[in-house]
Image (tube, rainbow, N blue to C red):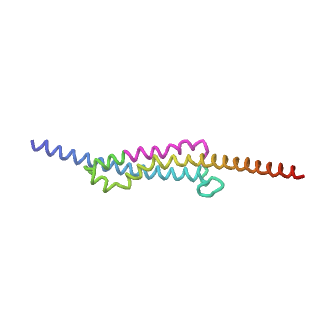
Amino acid sequence: MQLSIKHLMNSSYNSSNSLFYYSKIADLIVIGIVFLILIGFLAFDYEYFSFKEQIIKIPYHMKIYFELLPWILFAVLVFDLYFKFKIAGNWNKFIRINWIDIIMILLIPFLFPMKFFKVFIKSYKMINAGKYMIKSYQKIYKIMKSWRKKV
């Protein structure tokens, strides 16, 4: 009987130790993915940094892979939090220790799609410019019409 309890305690320790090891591997993968996302920003979204051309020359057809990286990061962070929850053992300890990771994983689905608003902002600016051009045409037309009546 004692041998089986000792064996269970030892296997529990080994599983906790392996979860810690997996968590550390996930942390290294997260660092690598974040680094790749930064490279993608410098290669494809160089306008954000007020540059006129690419800082890092990566072919444009590779951009789709860089668009997938935030979602891969999200998946790796979910697994990492799962490992950390299993290591912590209870919710209070888990939240107290890993609150930054939890906030980060909650913000990813909301922040990364916001870069697509850039397209909407450009469209809005173009529509606004068109609207101002039409308004100015109407004003010029009215002024010209009123001048013609006076002459």
Question: Would residue 59 be found to the left or right of residue 130 on screen?
Answer: left
Closest to the observer: 115 or 121? 121
Closest to the observer: 80 or 32? 80
What is the magenta range?
58-78
Question: Would residue 121 be found to the left or right of residue 13 on screen?
Answer: right
Residue that protrudes farthest toward the left in the picture:
1
Question: Would residue 19 be found to the left or right of residue 1 on screen?
Answer: right
The quarter of the picture where residue 48 lies is bottom right
Residue that protrudes farthest toward the bottom in the picture:
50
Look at the image and say whether residue 59 sits in the magenta stretch: yes
How many numbered discs, if any?
0
Quadrant in which the N terminus is drawn: top left
Q: Position of residue 94 (x, y in %)?
A: 30, 52
Look at the image and say whether residue 54 sits in the magenta stretch: no
Q: Position of residue 60 (x, y in %)?
A: 61, 44
Residue that protrudes farthest toward the right in the picture:
151
Q: Main secondary structure of the magenta part?
A: helix
Residue drawn at 21 percent across, 44 percent down: 11
Residue drawn at 87 percent across, 52 percent down: 150
Residue drawn at 22 percent across, 48 percent down: 13
Residue drawn at 63 percent across, 46 percent down: 123
Question: Would residue 29 be found to the left or right of residue 46 on screen?
Answer: left
Closest to the observer: 32 or 72? 72
Closest to the observer: 48 or 64? 48
